[in-house]
Image (cartoon, helix red, strand yellow):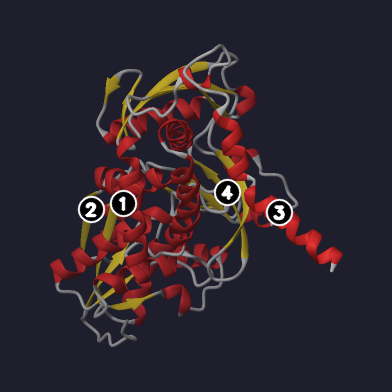
Amino acid sequence: MKKHTIKPGDLVVLAYSGGLDTSIIIPWLKEHYQVRVVAFCADLGQGDDFEAIRAKALASGAEAVEVADLRERFVVDFAFPMLRSEAIYEGVYLLGTSIARPLIAEALVRVARQYGALAVAHGATGKGNDQVRFELGIRALAPDLAVIAPWREWEITGRLQAMEYAKRHGVPVSATPASPYSRDQNIWHVSHEGGLLEDPAIPTPRDVYTWTADPVAAPDTPETIQIGFQSGNPIALNGENLDPVALVEKLNALGARHGIGRVTMVENRLVGMKSRGVYETPGGTLLYAAHSALTALTWDRETRAFAAEVALRMARLIYDGWWFSALRESLSAFVDRANLVVTGEVTLSLYKGQATHQAATSPYSLYSEDLATFDGGDYDHQDAEGFIRLFGLPMAMRHAQLERIQNS
């Protein structure tokens, strides 16, 4: 990627959310680079008032604002492929922020091309993972574009100073010193960082959560639901076929009502430090539980074992911003092939923060009650003797080898 070759009057497209960081970037770009700014907003289902965001960006100095509804593309082409791989970062994080960044980078490049811009800008900090994710996506798709990352240039060192800058420049922001959390939300999850969360010795404050119910206050009666899949993709809820966005939204409501999907973790950031974050992924948690239950029924032992290895690597690739890499695409080819048989219905019980697998059915099930039953069935027990002899042959040979060593 080019180092800055930006001249006064050039056009820069800014990935704009209307939050604290990106809100102050518009006046900062105009002040320090004397450039024209187009703000780009990605609608990923975060529920923002985009007309208000548009007005705010224009009032802050943007000459135009582009808003793209990317909800369906996000779910179908990014979140669901991740789900099919069962990727989970460090065994906990369902990657809601990570998986959104390559799509935003792709759309940012598209808008830059549309306007003939020479550069793009983003509000990711110099300490975070998102700067890498955005810029790797841009590098993969448009390496000729220059990238401006104000957090790596300006003298602002933290969110409190950013709030002061916003106040001086008349930019309204929702963050306050009393509630300094940095949040990222989309249809898949909401993340919370900063403030008291930066001390891992302090329990997660209750005011951090914005989406899910407190499991203690969740309904006292379990709720049973059925999720239908076709080739690894969720397609139905309680027997009703739904489009992908509507399905995720309904699952989010169900999971949130029962306090499902809360995670507090200390994670290893790509840039080398540990950070603490809180994540809420209500619908995604239900989908992961259901998909795992269905693969247990439809994948043979070796496929399931290898898929677990792929899931670990896929999680790292997504977390590290390598969505557009050859390796990610190749692993996705395996995932898609393996998921051809992941069709059927899973029954989950939702109760007090937990989603418990109760039952699963599939036309491609590998389960045979006739083979598994303790009461007769079409299984010759005598076959096991020869199997055990062959399966244990390496250990018998090893034992004989040790005896020779001891007697020599």
Residue at mark 2: 67
- Placement of 245 over or under 370, stated as above or below: below
* Separation of marks 3 and 4 at Cα, in angstroms: 18 Å
Q: Amino acid at mark 2?
A: Val
Q: Nearer the viewer, residue 241 or 261?
A: 241
Tags 3 and 4 in contact by the CB under 8 Å rule?
A: no
Q: Earlier in the sequence, mark 4 or mark 2?
A: 2
In which quadrant of the rendered image does the C terminus lie? Answer: bottom right
Q: Earlier in the sequence, mark 2 or mark 1?
A: 1
Tag in front: 3 or 2: 3
The secondary structure type at the circle numbered 3 is: loop
Residue 200 bears which disc, if any? 3
Q: Amino acid at mark 3?
A: Pro
Where residue 182 appears, as percent x and y from the top left, is: 52, 54
Q: Nearer the viewer, residue 147 or 13?
A: 147
In which quadrant of the rendered image does the N terminus lie? Answer: bottom left
- Placement of 168 over or under 252, stated as above or below: below
